[in-house]
Image (spheres, rainbow, N blue to C red):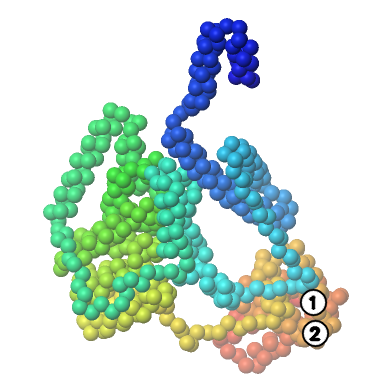
Amino acid sequence: LALQTVQSEVDRLREDNPDETAKLMSLYAQTQKSLDMLAITPEASTTLRTHVTGAYRTLCNNYVSTHTKLRKLEKRCEQDRLLAGSLSETREKGLADARKLLETLKKSVETIAEALDEKVPEIKEEEEEGTPSGVGLELWTGDEEREGEAAEKLGPFDDEETREFYRDLPDLLERIPPALLGMSPAEVEQMQALNIQRYGAEESVSTEGLEDDKGATTEDTSYDESSTNEDTEDDSTSKDNATNSSSENKDTPHYKLTLLLEAELPEMNRRERTDELAEKFCVNHGASKPSRKRLTKALFLVPRTRMDLLPYYARLAAILDRVFSDVGPPLVHDLEQQFHGLARWKKNVNSEGRTKNARLLGELTKFRVAPPIVVLRGLKRCLDDFSGFNIDVACCLLETCGRYLNRMEHTKDRLGSLMETMMRLRKAKNLDDRICAQIDSAFFMVTPPTNAHQRKVKVLPPVEAYMKYLFMELLSPVTESNVSFVVKQIQRLPWNSNNKCGFMVVKYMLKACRKGQFSAVNGVAEVAAGLKRTRPEVPTRLIDAVIEEIQWSMENPNFRDGQRLLIMTRLLGELHKSA
């Protein structure tokens, strides 16, 4: 509007005053030029928009994941509310905080999407699964727990908790903006594609190097005590320098990284703490290559006495290996060099260090950071000289990741041949009893023995199993409420459809007295008295069975049946008293 006003004035004064018209034209040109100028350069504008777009995508991913977690939390709270009647204050507060967080994220996403002219991510509501119709009792025995889909889901692990520890790793490429990682969006997408290729499938294991490599020799590295001492001196010197510099300024990234590696890293003894420390390192120090080298060195120099930290150190390396390509491979390379270098010593020099090295390699193998060929080569190296501490190292490798490799399709045959060689060496050599027991323990930990003469568990029909539960478990301790509940449940049994119901009730009454606790005798007598009016068949059969067993024991005396005769005699007295 201002420019239009100036233009109209110029047109009006052009004919009256030429000098004023020239001045107004120059003023108009300056105004137009100042309006066309930008506050920042186009390069800075493009960079800013790239960073803001990356932060917006990260925020969208957090918004979608938070929505999914909130739906799962609401389902669990609904189930708890149905079972317990109400939720605790802690659960109610946690649910309310989660809803507030989702609402805050939604507002932030909508605001940034409107500013960037982007689309807000759509949230797909999951359809509720239909509940099966019909009523009745369903008995779960747990026999098919690891069959079918459950076995495929667990993979090479024994239980769900172990599988989650080694497989469910946080994806920091989606949580953290690329600018904080020192990467461009194209590099992030390339790293994500590489992770899908390496870790996408549950059973995907690199088969590189698993072929028959006869004649292939592993290069020995000159790993001796002098190099270890030099490394230790260098570490101490660097630590002293870091301490001196930190005393001057505690806000530098160098001091914060030193504090993270020396104070927080040894205290990483929980899964949640490990994930938090990995995210903290990526946000504050991930973009610096020297910082990543220092972290790799700190993971390599695990204290020999802190074996409990090895799984968490390996988990930290696995999380960062999915973000940076220069953390996992150098660590595995250094560990493999150290393993073969220490194997050159015939005596038990640095035995704790060798054990630590073997266990850390095994943990990295289960996290799929180290390829399986590294452990298989190490095991073969120990079998080539199966004596001294090489036996302990071989057993340590099998105990750490032998069961995992035995369940993998690509390594099962190779590991089986190495274990057969180990058992042949055990039989051929004259070893101590302790070493033989250690080898057997490692072997059976990988392949548990199948006992053909194992006693088969008798599977009872549902009604009999419920009777056994009532008299053998629920009736102890004997209280008035327990007795009345058992009487009511016995009366609800299918007496009309099953002619043997009374016989089975008496059978488990006697079994509860013989094989259960001594106090169960009084409870069985009270249950029989409670069934006297509604089910007179039960006390009649019970008294008949007790008298018959006492008579048989008196006619055929045996010292082994003394305790049983005493129980029957007391049950007869309790029945007489309750009558």
- Under circle 2, the secondary element is loop
- For the point 52% across and 64% down, which residue is it? 160
Determine which quarter of the picture holds residue 478.
bottom right
- For the point 79% across and 71% down, which residue is it? 134
Q: Is residue 252 visible?
A: yes
Looking at this view, name the residue that lies furthest to the front. Answer: 15
Above or below: residue 141 compared with residue 1: below
Is disc 1 surrounded by few (<14), some (14 to 19) or many (20+) residues within 10 Å? some
Amino acid type of the residue that numbered disc 1 sits on in the rendered structure: Leu
| Near-viewer residue (334 or 172) | 172
- Under circle 1, the secondary element is loop
Pick the quarter of the image with the N terminus: top right
Q: Which residue is mark 1?
A: 493
Question: Do the numbered discs 2 and 1 sit on residues whose CB atoms are within 8 Å?
Answer: yes
Q: Looking at the picture, how far across and down is residue 268, in whole percent?
A: 40, 49
Q: CA distance from mark 2 to mark 1?
A: 9 Å
Q: Which residue is mark 2?
A: 498
Above or below: residue 58 compared with residue 196: above
Q: Looking at the picture, how far across and down is residue 304, in whole percent?
A: 28, 55
Above or below: residue 267 compared with residue 161: above
State left or right for residue 200 relative to residue 511: left
